[in-house]
């Protein structure tokens, strides 16, 4: 499993936001790919099981009520950890959806078209 660190997540986030200007997938295409990514991962067709699991844990960390305790006592510093996790999560989601879209494109590009036009 490739580990996606903070710097790599920020780089992936920036690259993903800029990629739509260069002909890459738009943010909307990435968002609508999420259910397909989850479905392919859960059925075992896509190999992103641990990456999706770590992103789910990061999402749970951000919304968990246990995380409210540091925010109550340390206000600003309690929010800093959430912001780091949120930035990592955004970068990881964008990076993983791009990786999934490439995987999906390669899978469908090698398949035989359903309708063949005959002239």
Image: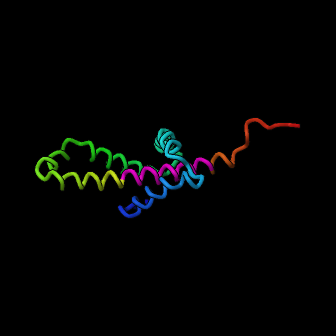
Residue lying furthest left: 73
Question: Residue 40: horizontal and vertical position, in percent?
Answer: 51, 42
Q: Is residue 99 magenta?
A: yes
Identify the colour scheme used.
Answer: rainbow
Q: Is residue 53 above or below residue 35?
A: below
Question: Residue 18: horizontal and vertical position, in percent?
Answer: 50, 55
Residue lying furthest right: 119
Give the position of the N terminus as an image quadrant: bottom left
Q: Nearer the viewer, residue 113 or 26?
A: 26
Q: Is residue 31 above or below residue 87?
A: above
**Horizontal placement of 5 versus 112: left or right?**
left
Question: Residue 71: horizontal and vertical position, in percent?
Answer: 16, 48
Residue lying furthest bottom: 7
Q: Residue at x 53, y 55 (%)?
A: 19
Residue 80 appears in the picture as rendered: yes
Q: Is residue 11 magenta?
A: no
Q: Residue at x 32, y 51 (%)?
A: 86
**Horizontal placement of 87 versus 37: left or right?**
left
Name the quadrant containing residue 13: bottom left
Q: Is residue 74 above or below residue 11?
A: above
Q: Residue at x 52, y 53 (%)?
A: 99
The part of the chain drawn in magenta is: 89-105
Give the position of the C terminus as an image quadrant: top right
Residue 44 appears in the picture as rendered: no
**Horizontal placement of 70 versus 13: left or right?**
left
Q: Main secondary structure of the magenta part?
A: helix
Question: Residue 80: horizontal and vertical position, in percent?
Answer: 23, 55
Number of numbered markers: 0
Q: Residue at x 40, y 59 (%)?
A: 9
């Amino acid at each position: 499993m490739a580990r996606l660190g903070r710097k790599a997540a920020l780089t992936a986030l920036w690259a993903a936001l800029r990629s739509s200007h260069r002909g890459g997938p738009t943010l909307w295409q990435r968002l609508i790919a999420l259910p397909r990514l989850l479905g392919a991962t859960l059925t075992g067709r896509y190999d992103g099981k641990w990456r999706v699991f770590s992103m789910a844990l990061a999402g749970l960390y951000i919304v968990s009520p246990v995380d409210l305790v540091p925010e109550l006592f340390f206000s600003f510093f309690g929010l800093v950890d959430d912001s780091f996790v949120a930035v990592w999560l955004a970068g990881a989601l964008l990076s993983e959806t791009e990786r999934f879209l490439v995987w999906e494109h390669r899978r469908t590009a090698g398949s035989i078209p359903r309708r063949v036009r005959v002239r």
